[in-house]
Amino acid sequence: MSQPSITLYEGDLPDGLSFGASVAIDCETMGLNPHRDRLCLVQLSAGDGTAHLVRVARGQSSAPNLEALLRDEGVLKLFHYGRFDIAAMFHAFGALATPVWCSKIASRLVRTYTDRHGLKALLHEMLGVDISKMQQTSDWGAADLSEAQMAYAASDVLHLHALKPKLEEMLVREGRMEMAQACWDFLPMRARLDLVGYPETDIFAHS
């Protein structure tokens, strides 16, 4: 694969940028608690080898073009573990991503022969693509992002479009596509439940 093209924007996507019918999205934050740890970066790709990175300033609560994209019912948003990313962006901007698709949910439903459902393992097995996770725990709130950080951020969105048909083929083969779709449809609400205090509680449980 040729080297990806990476463009960094400050605060929001530029006017007029289109991702077509589907866009891969991922986020980088200062930690895993959206109430404590701020959103630092949102990365997006149309699956065309280009990654668009939006740096979010401390205290920023609005990104009109990004928010419009998240809310656009005509654009499918592709995630890997969308539960976290959807919650992080909703908490930061008040924009709920919908409709959505998540490769981790698909993997858990159909790759029952393994407990390795991380993006690195998925891409290696299904696409023969190896990505580095060395920058996963780096400081995303730094004044300047390194080239290694930007390359890592881009790698999380560049391959989701190619991964989608592979996983969906397996879901259809195993008779679990309808189940997966129901999970994806519920995912934005699952993210909202996390934010209001139900991250571990099973609201469907008897007690």
Image (cartoon, rainbow, N blue to C red):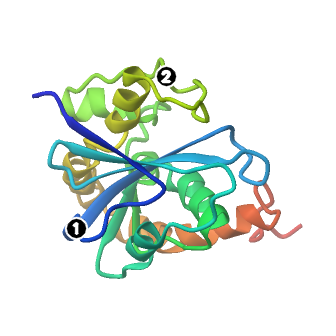
- Quarter of the image for residue 76 reads bottom left
Give the residue at x 32% y 34%. 155
Q: Is residue 190 visible?
A: yes
Rendered view: 129 above or below 204: above
Of the two numbered discs 2 and 1 on the same chain, state the one appearing first in sequence: 1
Q: Residue 31 vs residue 95: left or right?
A: right
Type of residue at label 2?
Answer: Gln
Mark 2 residue element: loop
**Closest to the observer: 155 or 161?**
155
- Identify the residue at the far left of this view: 2
Q: Position of residue 144 (x, y in %)?
A: 50, 29
**Badge 2 is on which residue?**
135
Looking at the rendered image, the disc whose residue lies closer to the viewer, 2 or 1, is 1
Q: Residues within 10 Å of mark 1 (few under 14, many from 20)?
A: few
The amino acid type, in three-letter code, at marker 1 is: Ser
Quarter occupied by residue 90 = bottom right
Percent of width and height locating residue 183 = 49, 67
**Which quadrant of the structure image shows residue 101?**
bottom left
Report the disc number at residue 157.
Answer: none
Q: Is residue 32 above or below residue 193?
A: above
- Gap in Å between the C-alphas at discs 2 and 1? 28 Å
Residue where numbered disc 1 is placed: 18
Q: Residue at x 33, y 24 (%)?
A: 131
Q: Position of residue 192 (x, y in %)?
A: 67, 69
